[in-house]
Amino acid sequence: MELSVIIVSYNVRHFLEQCLISVYKALEGIDSEVFVVDNNSADGSCSMVGRRFPEARLIMNPENRGFSAANNQALKLATGRYLLLLNPDTLVEEETFKKCITFMDDHPDAGAAGVRMIDGKGRFLPESKRAIPTPGTAFFKISGLSRLFPHSGLFNRYYLGHLDNNSTAQADVISGAFMFIRREAFEKAGFLDEDYFMYGEDIDYSYRLIKSGFVNYYYPGAKIIHYKGESTKKENLNVLVNFYKAMLIFVRKHFNRGNNRSYVFLVQTAIFFRAGLSLGKRVILFILPEFAYNPLKKEEKTVIISDSEGYSRIKELLELNPSGNIVSGRVSISPDDISAEVLGNLGQLKEVLRVNKVREVIFASRNVNTSLIIDSMHAIADSNVKIKIASSDEKYILGSRYVSTIDNPDSFNREYTGNRFIIWLKKLFNRKAVLPLDP
């Protein structure tokens, strides 16, 4: 067995489905196995996996066991020469796995490798490459100094800000969203530490790989989309608690001795300070109305990247739950496609957005492969547009914290920047509130 892919899922049915579609495309020609460990989802995830991906080995937990414990369940069964821990809110390129296998074969000292990750808006994710959060590094990160000096090798060592995002480099910490592990390294480092329920387990495991005599690499030759936090967005307070708890576990486990104790105290102080600020911010956002809110906001323009048939089907899906946006037209995949609704071709995408003042882009995954979607997203990352992807059957559309389905067009996962007060009033009085439909 060449590769074992392990995905831990919790209430992200549609993201998981798209992830698995991309995974199986990338696994073509590779001797492989796929594990899906479900942590007691209540959104139909398990039935979807069983129906659409019967070849996947599905493990259904009766409770949410957390990320580390769920991964360990599959790691005990996996037989691959390489092991991949993959988040369900990701999309991988068609050649991702082949590239990673070749890279690891060419670097026998590598314990694990991570890839270049972009978010749902096409922006580079700095957690693609990180350093071990020693007390000093952790303090600069938690205190906010890393943000003030993003390219500093001292103040932003946590995100290795001094290294080129496009160049292969040694990176102490590999993200748990995509951690490509050599079996020999796994056998020496052991299973994930189950003291980490959520967050921190990737930092801990990366450090243990290094202590086992291996090197971890950041490999930007392969790219993925990572929407980030889809499984946890509805549990904001729990996410906050688990994140800072994980930081404390790591620092106390690895650095709470000798001269490091004074640094540990500073880190703990910074953690509690930042946790307090984060909690305060959430309280303010919850009780503070957005005074500038206008339900009659100006209509925005959308373009769809697809062929003619996909364009019509995606328009029909959008009409089931109108957002107030106007579909301006289509961006063709081929320069030879000059149908009436075509504004330009994919090579002209950035110019199409500028000339037509477009605020939303929808890719049709049936027509555009993942590699091309990722490259196009990255190319327009500075265009300040919302980016979404329609499923291959055009039955649902995904974006950052956004889902719209043909079966349930009201199933939007929104990340509001305001209007918390309206939502609170709606819950309090059990009445409908007028809310914007944009994510």
Image: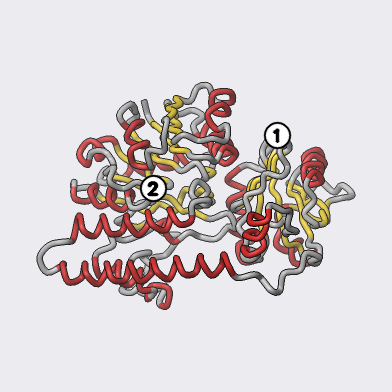
Residue 131: x %, y % from top left: 31, 61
Residue type at mark 1: give it: Asp
Residue type at mark 2: give it: Gly
**Quadrant for the C terminus in the image:** bottom right
Above or below for 200 versus 405: below
Residue 436: x %, y % from top left: 73, 59
Distance between the alpha carbons at the discs numbered 1 and 2:
30 Å
Q: Please tell me how crowded label 1 is: few (under 14), some (14-19), or many (20+) other residues with Cα within 10 Å.
A: few
Residue denoted by label 2: 176
Above or below for 398 versus 152: above
- Residue at position x 24%, y 60% from top? 251
Residue 359: x %, y % from top left: 73, 62
Q: Which mark is residue 360?
A: none
- Residue at position x 15%, y 67% from top? 261
Horizontally, residue 384 falls left or right of residue 343, namely left
Residue denoted by label 1: 393
Q: Please tell me how crowded label 2 is: few (under 14), some (14-19), or many (20+) other residues with Cα within 10 Å.
A: many
* Residue positioned most to the front: 429
Residue 82 lies in what quarter of the image? top left
